Image (tube, rainbow, N blue to C red):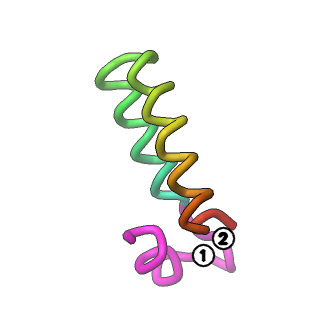
Amino acid sequence: VIQILLSDFISLNGIRPDFILIYLLYISIQHGSFKGILLGFTLGMFSDLLGVGT
């Protein structure tokens, strides 16, 4: 939801931030690579299913 609502407002010259990737990097650094891998797979699947990715 945040990706859809905020990415257009924060864009610079048409470049929009990927909040899913930013969140994934934060979790991976804080909780380790295994949780990062699992979360990355899960968020990637949800992103593809919901059509959030461009």
SS state under label 1: loop
In the image, residue 35 above or below residue 23: above
Hey, what amino acid is under mark 2?
A: Ile
Is 14 colored magenta in this rendering? yes
Pointer 1: residues within 10 angstroms few (<14), some, or many (20+)? Answer: few
- Residue sitting at x 38%, y 69%: 2
- The majority secondary structure of the magenta stretch comes to loop
The reply, left or right, for residue 19 in relation to residue 16 is left
SS state under label 2: loop
- Residue sitting at x 60%, y 76%: 12
In the image, residue 21 above or below residue 39: below
Residue that sits furthest to the left in the current view: 30
x then y, percent, for residue 32? 37, 17
| Residues rendered magenta in the picture | 1-17
Kindly indicate whether the residue at mark 2 contacts the one at mark 1 (C-beta within 8 angstroms).
yes
- Residue sitting at x 44%, y 39%: 24
Quadrant of residue 17 within the rendered picture: bottom right
The reply, left or right, for residue 46 in relation to residue 29 is right
The tag on residue 51 is: none
Per the model, the C-alpha gap separating discs 1 and 2 is 5 Å
Q: Nearer the viewer, residue 51 or 3?
A: 51
The tag on residue 15 is: 2
x then y, percent, for residue 52? 57, 67
Which residue corresponds to mark 1?
12
- Location of the C terminus by quadrant is bottom right
Hey, what amino acid is under mark 1?
A: Leu
- Residue sitting at x 63%, y 63%: 53
Quadrant of residue 25 within the rendered picture: top left
In the image, residue 51 above or below residue 37: below
